[in-house]
Image: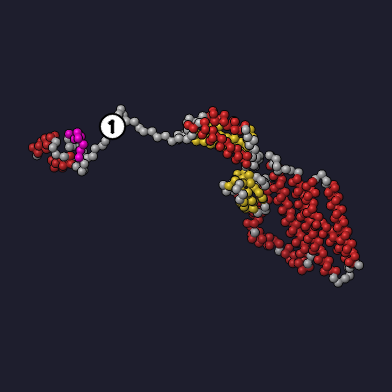
Amino acid sequence: MPFIAVTLAVAAGLVLSWLLRKIILRLNRRRPELQATSRVARQPLRLALCLIGVRTALGLTAAGESWHSAVDHLLLIALIGSLGWLAVAILLIIEAVVLGRYSVDVADNRRARRLRTQMILARRIGVALVVVLAVGSVMLTFPAIQALGAGLLASAGVISIVAGLAAQTSLVNVFAGMQLAFTDAIRVDDVVVVQKEWGRIEEITLTYVVVHIWDDRRLILPSTYFTTTPFENWTRRQSEVMGTVEFDLDWRAPVEDMRAELRRVLAGTELWDERVGILQITDATGGFVRVRILVSAADSAALFDLRCLIREAMVGFLQQGHPQALPQQRWTEAASDGGTPARRQQPLRGLGSPAAAGARQPADPHESQLFTGSIEAVQRSRAFTGPGDEVFQDRDQTLASRN
């Protein structure tokens, strides 16, 4: 008798799950995303309905048996697990249905990326709560744990303080992750610059954020980094960005021809969004003129390709048509005054180098500012300025006669 009841209960559970799925899909036939995601709830729904039917059948046919209580306890634990599994599947279906209404493939997808970030984080929080509740419900099915739970609730204040102190860092990251998701600071697929690296937000969890770097590396940062450290978000309000291309050229650079070439390049590419496209000289010092080209694009990826295109086109344009505009280093030599050779400084006599021919000697030893005073000083001066000068000999005789 119990065996037949269990068989009928399982069959009824399978049929009921099939009917429920067909009814839900028929009511939502205009939503193709529900057709694909509803498969994740098929197995937990079947299991939950079958377990409910089996428990009901055994309760009606084998309530007095000795093994009924143990089997019923196992069936209850399995039912709690299947209901938790079903709740997680329902969260996944809700997420898929909500995100299916907003596409991230459009140019201005800021709202879609914001909703995607919030839904993903909300689903993860919901899954964590479902798992905790399921595990707690299973534990409460044991009488011994029920008594333990009453004692734990009595000391919940002390336990919460200890747990908060022990998991302070983890809790800070959890709250930081929730703050990032629901304050719209960053979103999935946002273009950011962190740690001097350019990349996109690939994943936001409760404790960390994954940044997909442009060279396919992944930069994993704690959630608190984005709440305590400044960073660049290039798609905070809109995806359109502007960028520059700079050249240091010679003063003979053909500015008007470069403007015409820039207009030609921009007109022939789809990377330019037709918002900004100008060429200006921003500096003219140090022997060069600095030419800056300012352009705009629909997003950062298109801007990078556009800047490379303009740089390559301008370099080729200058090389082929205006080579005189390329950067050059100039060296000039100072010309002599009327062809007269520069005057060389003569070394002092008496220091091992002969005096140049025709060099003028001081008329008075006092003018030399070497030795002044007595005849002995004059004689010492002659030793350095050299004998043979008649002016010096007359001066010596005059000083000697005075003495």
User: Observer-nearest residue: 118 or 30?
Assistant: 30
Q: Is residue 140 above or below residue 103?
A: below
Residue closest to the eye, 270 or 378: 270
Horizontally, residue 31 falls left or right of residue 116, namely: right
Q: Quadrant of the C terminus?
A: top left
User: Against 145, is 114 above or below?
Assistant: above
Image coords of residue 293 (percent x, y): 56, 34
Three-letter amino acid code of the residue under disc 1: Pro
Question: Most extreme residue toward the bottom, as rendered?
Answer: 66
Q: Residue at x 8, y 37 (%)?
A: 401
Q: Residue furthest right?
A: 1
Query: Mark 1 = which residue?
Result: 341
> On screen, 399 above or below 33?
above
Q: Main secondary structure of the magenta part?
A: loop
Q: Position of residue 17 (x, y in %)?
A: 85, 55
Horizontal arrangement in the rendering, residue 6 relative to residue 148 (left or right): right
Q: Is residue 8 visible?
A: yes
In terms of secondary structure, where does tag 1 sit? Answer: loop
Q: Magenta stretch: residue 358 in it?
A: yes
Q: Position of residue 177 (x, y in %)?
A: 66, 51
- Graded by Cα atoms within 10 Å as few (under 14), some (14 to 19) or many (20 or more), the crowding at tag 1 reads few
Residue sitting farthest toward the front: 320
The correct choice, above or below, for 201 with respect to 387 in the image is: below
What colour-coding does the image apply? secondary structure
347 inside magenta stretch? no
Q: Residue at x 64, y 51 (%)?
A: 209
Residue segment shown in magenta:
354-363
Q: Quadrant of residue 72?
A: bottom right
The residue shown at (64%, 60%) is 166
Q: Which residue is rendered at x = 59% and y = 33% of the image?
A: 265
Asked if one can make out residue 374 in the rendered structure from this viewpoint, the answer is no
x, y (%) of residue 270? Answer: 64, 35
